[in-house]
Amino acid sequence: MDFSSSKDNKRKTFNEINITPLTDIFLVLLIIMMVIAPSFQSIDNNIDMPNINSGLSVEETNATVSITKDGSFYVNEKKTTCDMLESNLFSIIGKLDKKEVIVRADKETKSSEIMKVMKAAQNAGFEKLVVAGEPLNEAEQKQLKEEVENNE
């Protein structure tokens, strides 16, 4: 004797989705991205800019050459070699309004490395080269002025 009805024999459809495994996957991906994200920062963290006591502010242009203390070259934050520096500068000069290049060099960079950038920029057709530095804060400027006055 079968006490079940024909309606009970039909399987009920499963209309709910278990999102717990999906949530776990997204949390793991979020943690991975949080760990990896700092490595995507700009190369400017490797450059310790020299201090200057006067000068004008430099407006950012599309042609920036950065040099790290170990002699690595970057054109607009893309790593390049010394041999490819001129061709990289030549490829971007047509896109610029002003034919000027900004050089950002670490304070421990040898002057011969900056001279290589100057030569490459001149050969690529740039008319102006700006060497950028970090300005001194007001307290450092005051201390520098006092030292100069004391030495005189």
Image (cartoon, rainbow, N blue to C red):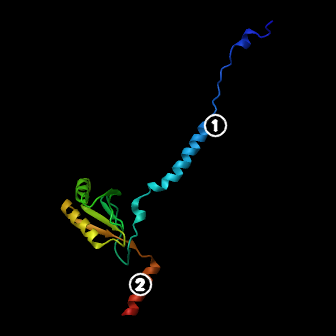
Query: Which residue is painted at 60% across and 41% down in the image?
Result: 24
Checking the image for residue 144, the label placed there is: 2
User: Where's residue 49, x and y in %?
Assistant: 39, 70
Asked which secondary structure carries label 1, the reply is: helix
Location of the C terminus by quadrant is bottom left
Looking at the picture, does residue 46 appear above or below residue 14?
below
Label 2 CA crowd tier, 10 Å (few <14, some 14–19, many 20+)? some
Q: Nearer the viewer, residue 71 or 23?
A: 71
CA gap between label 1 and label 2 equals: 63 Å
* Front: mark 1 or 2: 1
Query: Which residue is painted at 24% across and 61% down in the image?
Result: 99
Amino acid identity at mark 2: Leu
Which residue is under mark 1? 20
Q: Nearer the viewer, residue 49 or 11?
A: 11
Query: Which residue is painted at 40% across and 73% down in the image?
Result: 135
**Image quadrant where residue 151 sits:** bottom left
Looking at the picture, does residue 15 appear above or below residue 2?
below
